[in-house]
Amino acid sequence: MRNNEHKKRGAVGAVLGSALAVSMAVAGFSAPAQASEVQWDLSIVGKPRAFTANVEALAAEVDRLSGGEFKIKVHFGGALAPSRETLDGLKIGAFDAGVFCAAWHPGKTPGLMGLSLPFLPILNLEEQEHTLETFLGNAAIMDELAKWNSYPVMGTLVPRYEIMGKGKPPLTMDDWEGRRLSAPAGLAAAMETLGAITAMQPAAETYGALDRGVVDMVGMPFTYAFSAYKIQEISDWYTSNLALGSTGCLVAANKASWENLPEKYQAMLEAAKPVAYAAQRAAYEGADSVNVGVFAEAGLTKITYTDDQRAAITASAQTIWDAWVKEVSEEHGLPGAELLGLLTN
């Protein structure tokens, strides 16, 4: 937690592995703030876009509710931590809060990876909001985050994934065989059943990977992410109804920052969440209304599969779900079946 007398700055790269910096971070969170104004520093990667709309609205709403006494400064562009080090930064107290996705580092939060399973029956962003709130409030998930000295503040909505790529459009399910795809682990597993070769590229690196031929196609949240990273500029086609699923992203706080935050400000964060979720839904809807037209203007082929074609891939879902339950239960001691139930019921 930061107040007017003591504000830490700097990227997580400057503190990771440094005993001195860690001790300063711990000292900075050692006692509840006494000053009337509290400021949190929140880390997020990339530029302002639909994905960041929730934290922007969250910051604005708590500022309003507190009369300017509680402020959240959103640091864009990975200024405080790159994507795959956000969770590490939270663990050592390099900043008060951050946004991360489990798929950036699957081994760190295997329970959260349940949100990245393919073809979960979560059909829209309103349903996703409810699922996120329930899932993040589960005791096993909270314990998993606590191992990283983190506390879940709220979910980050992510639309269902589609695929955009170069070359011959995959008009049949047989056309995926041998193609190289960048997609998060859980969703990639579904495409592997069709013969795709998968690897996970950080979002900021997907344009370069596709342009250089490292991959043939990329899976991203439809439509905003393709536009945000300008993938349509070097692509030939995109799928419109694979609806692979989403991925687990959230806003998390450093545990000490949360515990040292006065209760009235904790309550304000809770009260601000509906506003933040609504702002993010509106941002995605606004992006969709523009981007579909942009894709058409770029000359991309829009691929729409029949129900029978989609059935060839959705049939893999239960096998992938069962394998995840077995893995997290046996290897990580998590209640896999219980967690899957939260995602499918």
Image (cartoon, helix red, strand yellow):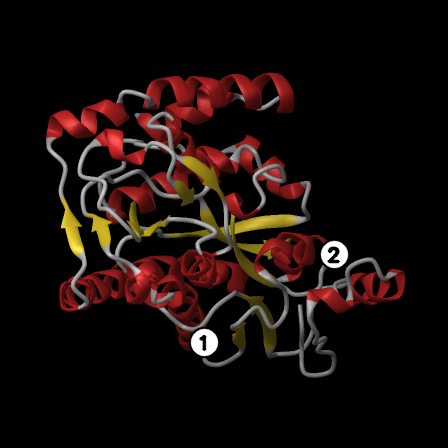
Please name the amino acid that badge 1 sits on.
Asp
Identify the residue at horizontal 40%, vertical 77% (top origin). 64
Q: CA distance from mark 2 to mark 1?
A: 26 Å
- Quadrant housing residue 20: bottom right
Circle nearer the viewer, 2 or 1 = 2
Q: Is residue 24 above or below residue 304?
A: below
Q: Residues within 10 Å of mark 1 (few under 14, many from 20)?
A: some
Left or right: where does residue 224 sit relative to residue 150? left
Q: Is residue 345 above or below residue 212?
A: above
Secondary structure, mark 1, is: helix
- Quadrant housing residue 224: bottom left
Precedes in sequence: disc 2 or disc 1: 1
User: Quadrant of the image for the N terminus?
Assistant: bottom right
Left or right: where does residue 92 sit relative to residue 174? right
Q: Position of residue 13 (x, y in %)?
A: 73, 65
Q: Position of residue 134 (x, y in %)?
A: 40, 38
Left or right: where does residue 154 sit relative to residue 43? left
Left or right: where does residue 220 sit relative to residue 26? left
Identify the residue at horizontal 15%, vertical 65% (top origin). 289
Instruction: Identify the residue under disc 2.
Output: 92
Q: Give whichever of 52, 7 is nearer the camera.
A: 52
Disc on res. 63: 1
Q: Is residue 274 above or below residue 190?
A: below
- Label 2 close to label 1 by CB (< 8 Å): no
Please name the amino acid that badge 2 sits on.
Ile
Disc on res. 187: none
Q: Is residue 229 above or below residue 106?
A: below
Q: Residues within 10 Å of mark 2 (few under 14, many from 20)?
A: many
Is residue 316 visible in this depiction of the protein? Answer: yes
- The number of numbered discs placed on residues in the rendered structure image is 2
Q: Position of residue 276 (x, y in %)?
A: 35, 62
Q: Position of residue 288 (x, y in %)?
A: 20, 61
